[in-house]
Each structure stands twice: as structure tokens, then as C-alpha cells.
Image (cartoon, grey):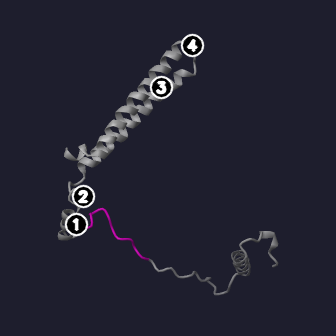
């Protein structure tokens, strides 16, 4: 719980309260306008509480994520040297769900019958010309 009272988390808590109260206040304002005869305000009266619920959802998800993460994941500002010593002393373990990327060698595809396609060769020459002449338009191609 101590991790939830850092300056960054206090700012998040305050932002959540301000946004939720503001969005609910705007929703109430839209309800009073809708009751006064503005039919369009009924849509906004529903929309603002949805925004408030979304803010609560994101805040709750981030709160759970912070509580589930290991306490040593985030180094504190007071003791960066101690965090470096702890990181150097513990072997780095790859989590079970994370794997190394598979390296695949890429070889150019060769035609099955061994003959080059004339249209493909012409198109490749056209692309090479466009690459060599960056300011040229496709209509300027001499070939």
C-alpha cells in the first residue's frame, strides 16, 4: 500500500477524483437542461457518466496493476544505488510467458521454373529508377 502514496500516485488519485466529480457534475447539468426542454441534452446526460465510469475503470486497472507488480520492480528515488545492487545480485529470469524472438533467414524467392519474369524485372527497374530519382514523378520514367 505504501506504493500508492508516492507523489505520482497522489497526482493520479487527485486527477481521478477531479475528473469523476467534474464529469458527474456535467452529467447533472445536462439532465437539468434536458428537463428544461433540450432534447439533445439527454444524450449528453448519458455520455458524461460513461466518461466518469471510464476514468474509474482506468484508475482501478492501474491500481490493481501496481499492487500486483513485485515491490522491487520500481526503484525508489531515495535508494537508486541499493536498487542497482539488488538487480546485479539477482539473476535475470525470463518470465514463462515471454520468449525470445525466432530468427529466420530470409532468402530471395527464386522462380520455380528458374526463368525470370520479364514483367517483374521491368517493374523492379522502374522502382529502382524512382528510388534513384526522388523528385521525379512516375510519368517522367523514360522506360
Quarter of the picture containing the C terminus is bottom right
Mark 4: secondary structure: loop
Q: Residue at x 42, y 76 (%)?
A: 103
Q: Can you tell which of label 2 and label 3 is closer to the viewer?
A: 2
Label 1: state its secondary structure.
helix
Mark sitting earlier along the chain (4/2)? 4
Q: Residue 44: horizontal and vertical position, in percent?
A: 51, 26
Measured Cα–Cα span from mark 1 to mark 2 = 8 Å
Total labels: the figure holds 4
N-term-proximal mark, 1 vs 2: 2
Q: Residues within 10 Å of mark 3 (few under 14, many from 20)?
A: some
Which residue is at a point 48% across and 20% down the rendered structure image? 29
Between 89 and 119, the one lying in front of the other is 89
Give percent across and percent down for residue 109. Answer: 58, 80
Q: Main secondary structure of the magenta part?
A: loop
Which numbered disc, 4 or 3, marks the residue that appears first in the sequence? 4
Q: Which mark is residue 37?
A: 4
Which residues are the magenta region? 93-103
Apparent side of residue 86 relative to residue 30 in the rendered image (left or right): left
The picture places residue 48, in percent across and down from the top left corner, at 46, 28
Q: Position of residue 87 (x, y in %)?
A: 21, 66
Question: Could you tell me which residue is drawn at 67 percent across and 86 percent down?
Answer: 115
> Which disc is residue 132 wearing?
none
Label 1–label 2 contact, CB within 8 A: yes
Mark 2 lies on residue: 75
Location of the N terminus by quadrant is top left
Q: Residue at x 31, y 46 (%)?
A: 8
Q: CA distance from mark 4 to mark 3?
A: 16 Å
| Residue indicated by mark 1 | 84
The label shown at residue 46 is 3
Amino acid at each position: 500500500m505504501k506504493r500508492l502514496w508516492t507523489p505520482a500516485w497522489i497526482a493520479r488519485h487527485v486527477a481521478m477524483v477531479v475528473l469523476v466529480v467534474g464529469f458527474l457534475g456535467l452529467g447533472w447539468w445536462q439532465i437539468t437542461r434536458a428537463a428544461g426542454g433540450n432534447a439533445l441534452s439527454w444524450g449528453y446526460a448519458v455520455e458524461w457518466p460513461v466518461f466518469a465510469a471510464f476514468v474509474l475503470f482506468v484508475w482501478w486497472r492501474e491500481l490493481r496493476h501496481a499492487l500486483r507488480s513485485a515491490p522491487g520492480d520500481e526503484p525508489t528515488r531515495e535508494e537508486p544505488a541499493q536498487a542497482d545492487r539488488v538487480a546485479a545480485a539477482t539473476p535475470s529470469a525470463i518470465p514463462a510467458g515471454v520468449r525470445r524472438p525466432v530468427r529466420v533467414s530470409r532468402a530471395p524467392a527464386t522462380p520455380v521454373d528458374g526463368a525470370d519474369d520479364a514483367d517483374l524485372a521491368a517493374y523492379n527497374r522502374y522502382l529502382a529508377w524512382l528510388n534513384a530519382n526522388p523528385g521525379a514523378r512516375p510519368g517522367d520514367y523514360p522506360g
